[in-house]
Amino acid sequence: MTKPFGALPPGRLAATLAALGAGGAELVVREGQTVTPAQPARLHDAARELTRHGLRLGVVTTDLTEAGGTADAILGACADLGVPLVRLGWWRYDATVGYQRILDRARRDLAGLAVLGRRHGVRLALQLHHGTIHPSAAHALRLTDELAIYLDPGNQAMEGSEQLAMSLDLLGDRLACVGVKNAAWRDGGLDWQPLADGGVVDWPEALRTLRERGYTGPLSLHAHYPTADPVADVGRDLAHLGRL
């Protein structure tokens, strides 16, 4: 996931990922990143540079929550490039609004995005994310009958967790990607930390379970912890993941 590298030019980003030994990119389309929502055409520049460095543009991650003009432009660019998966935004839980009202809105929003995804021939995914109404496989499947699901045991641990085997049972062939990160308890709460330092998610066991269930899709390494040297820290985590 390219988030730690900020707004690097496409060529430098691709060269950095290649030097680290990554197989591809989960490219974040967000303000302050290599590609922003206002400049979806830069996806073509990023894809060209990734290809030139022998890397795959495997996932494009967005904050899209409605099927407007921005979504149309981003999904159109992804379709042109043959991007296999586009991750959508989040529908956060707010107790003052209430679960049912947020659920109803999310279902309407996702249905509109699904229509746009079908029009462009792009596969869309909803990520399991803490603080939302889709923190687990069970919750995510209440929102949509159509979209793929992006599993994330680290995010699930932040929320309280769901047994991985049960998540896989529920998701079946709708599982499209697995986010990889870890966290540890500090000062009464969970904080993100380098994957190489371990944490609350037992990744050796999680990877065994994924293999046993026949998962062959992408693993996307996330580095959400503070870092003064993202190249060194992501490289260390990537090497650790490779050993696992």
Image: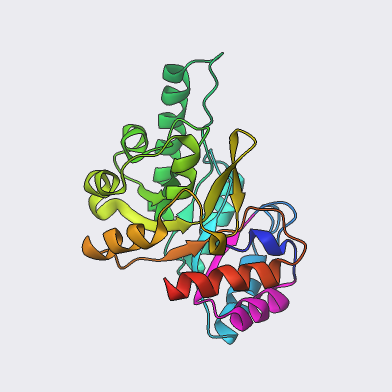
Name the one closer to the observer, 222 or 31: 222
Q: Residue at x 66, y 53 (%)?
A: 225
What percent of the width, then of the height, locates residue 162?
34, 39
Rendered image quadrant of residue 133: top left
| Left or right relative to 100: residue 17 | right
What percent of the width, then of the height, locates residue 188?
60, 33
Q: Residue at x 29, y 39 (%)?
A: 145
| Left or right relative to 147: residue 193 | right
Q: Residue at x 61, y 58 (%)?
A: 223
Figure check: 76 above or below 97: below
Numbered-mark total: 0
What percent of the width, then of the height, locates residue 140?
37, 37
Residue 17 can be seen in this image: yes
Name the one closer to the observer, 82 or 100: 100
**Residue 208 magenta:** no
Q: Quadrant of the C terminus?
A: bottom left
**Residue 20 magenta:** yes
What percent of the width, then of the height, locates residue 210?
29, 60
Rendered image quadrant of residue 189: top right
- Segment tinted magenta in the rendering: 9-29
Residue 129 can be seen in this image: no
Most distant residue in the right direction: 228
